[in-house]
Amino acid sequence: MKIKHPAVKSDVFKLVSLLEFDLEVGGKFFPARVELFRDTERENHWRCRMWERELCHLTFTLRRGSKSGKRIESDEEVLIERTWVLSDKFEDFEAARAGEAIKRFIDALKEYLQRVTA
């Protein structure tokens, strides 16, 4: 798949696998989400992202809902990308199959966890 437009600067990546698990590092609870994407143009090319689920208190910039003009506040769960903690090599990497790609990412995560928890 290709999106032909001057503003589109990359291939299209399709989500093929999604993992969620909970970590605890240094006493901090870390609910994690890992996404694996396949490049739709180049065979054996992948992208992997890791996200941390975090609860945030938000104040919306647009005033809505009341005549007083008060801004609406809300506690929301957001995803914060944490892939960079491991490496930027997961932005575009090669592997023969999805299983191999996700294994490479998980192995890098385990190496990182070994370093930070030792």
Image (cartoon, helix red, strand yellow):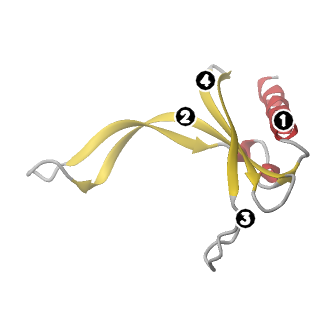
**Three-letter amino acid code at disc 3?**
Asp
Q: Nearer the viewer, residue 41 or 62?
A: 41
Measuring from the top left, give residue 74's x and y in whole percent: 31, 38
Contact flag, marks 1 and 2 (Cβ < 8 Å): no
Measuring from the top left, give residue 17's x and y in whole percent: 70, 38
Q: First in sequence: mark 4 or mark 3?
A: 3
The C terminus: image quadrant: top right
**Looking at the image, residue 82 lies above or below residue 116:** below
Residue 9's quadrant in the figure?
bottom right
**Three-letter amino acid code at disc 4?**
Lys
Residue 28's quadrant in the figure?
top right
Q: CA distance from mark 1 to mark 2?
A: 24 Å
**Three-letter amino acid code at disc 1?**
Gly
Residue of label 4: 28
Q: Return the mark for residue 11.
A: 3
- Between disc 1 and disc 2, the foreground one is 1
Residue of label 1: 99
SS label for mark 3? loop
- Between disc 1 and disc 4, the foreground one is 1
